[in-house]
């Protein structure tokens, strides 16, 4: 496939969901969510190098509890992240080597990414320079201002972006540099390319490739795992393990 580096942003503190343990460090049937995501990426055979971005201060803990006990390559690089996802990815991008041709960015909290989706996104990026996995919106989306509906965009044009997102290395590094220089904040990686006028190819995503953000997402993740692995091999619910928390530093 050529030289492909994956960046996995895992630097969130999970505050938004109301919990105090970052979601990527929760156990799902005994295995941390971040570990599950990394195992899927490495098992695909499509990734040549892996950079994981973690909350600053969690680097050693992460190596010991999230990587070392599992069959993951020892070459995985761990990088301290920033306050927002964009800053975390930017820090990861700064570690990407010059031999890398394609960069795949995949959220730590999406452990159900399939090898086919990964391959499709990488191939689209190889052909078009930039690619994003996305699923068609199944609900009507309203633009709301001051508590009233301002607009209702036509649903057939609306897609929900997922990760993986993949890009030619030079393009995504330039997009991140420009965003930082302009003080621009996007909500995904593709958005930073779009503002430079680069066309981003859409790859049909997977409804099961969920982003685990809330307690309900954790329940859904347990259900997906039960279907995949069968019921009865450990608890489907998420629990913490020797927890890392920013307050414990
Ligand atoms: O914040 P959001 O839900 O968009 O997080 C998506 C991914 O980005 C998660 O895997 C999270 O750990 C990561 N993230 C990060 N650095 C931050 C915030 C979020 O790497 N400062």
Image (cartoon, rainbow, N blue to C red):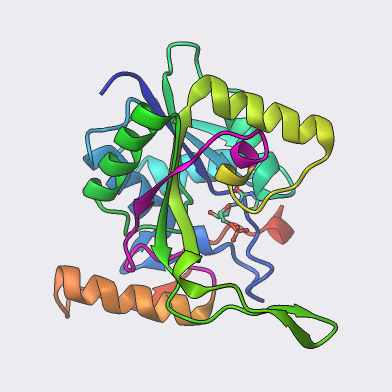
The quadrant of the picture showing ligand 1 is bottom right
Spot occupied by residue 195 in the image (x, y as percentages of width and height): 67, 40
Residue at the far bottom: name it.
148
Task: Return the residue nearer the eye: 106 or 82.
Answer: 106
What is the quadrant of residue 244 in the picture? bottom right
Residue 235 visible: no
Q: Nearer the viewer, residue 107 or 205?
A: 205
What are the residue bounds of the magenta stretch? 192-213
Give the camera-side residue of 169 and 70: 169
Rendered residue at 37%/78% (across/down): 220
Q: Residue furthest top?
A: 98
From the image, give the main secondary structure of the stretch colored magenta. Answer: loop
Name the residue: 28% across, 48% down.
40
Which residue extends farthest left?
230
Q: Where residue 126 sits: x, y (%)?
A: 35, 27
Q: Measured along the vertical axis of the image, is residue 122 above or below residue 110? A: above
Q: Is residue 235 found left or right of 232 in the rendered image? A: right
Quarter of the image that includes the N terminus: top left
Residue found 58% across the figure and 62% down from its top: 22
Occupied quadrant, residue 4: top left
Q: Is residue 88 magenta?
A: no
Residue 80 found in image quarter: top right
Query: Is 204 covered by the magenta stretch?
Result: yes
From the viewer's perspective, is residue 68 above or below residue 117?
Answer: above
Left or right, 181 with reference to 57 = right
Tell me residue 67's x, y (percent): 40, 42
């Amino acid at each position: 496939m050529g030289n492909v580096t994956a960046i996995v942003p895992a630097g969130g503190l999970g505050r938004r969901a109301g919990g105090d343990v970052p979601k990527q460090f929760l156990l799902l049937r005994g295995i941390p969510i971040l570990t599950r995501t990394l195992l899927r990426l490495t098992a695909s055979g499509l990734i040549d190098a892996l950079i994981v971005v973690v909350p600053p201060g969690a680097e050693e803990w992460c190596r010991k509890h999230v990587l070392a006990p599992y069959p993951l390559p020892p070459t995985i690089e761990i990088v301290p992240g920033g306050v927002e996802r964009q800053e975390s990815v930017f820090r990861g991008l700064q570690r990407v080597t010059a031999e890398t041709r394609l960069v795949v960015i995949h959220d730590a909290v999406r452990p159900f990414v399939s090898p086919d989706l990964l391959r499709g996104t990488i191939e689209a990026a190889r052909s078009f320079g930039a690619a994003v996995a996305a699923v068609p919106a199944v609900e009507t989306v309203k633009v709301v201002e001051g508590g009233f509906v301002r607009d209702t965009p036509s649903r057939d044009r609306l897609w929900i972006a997922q990760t993986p997102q993949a890009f030619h290395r030079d393009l995504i590094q330039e997009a991140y540099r420009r965003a930082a220089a302009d003080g621009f904040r996007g909500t995904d990686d593709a958005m930073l390319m779009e503002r430079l006028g680069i066309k981003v190819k859409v790859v049909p995503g997977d409804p099961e490739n969920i982003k685990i953000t809330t307690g309900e997402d954790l329940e859904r993740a347990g259900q997906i795992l039960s279907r995949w692995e069968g019921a009865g091999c450990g608890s489907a619910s998420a629990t913490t393990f020797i927890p890392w928390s920013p307050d414990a530093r």
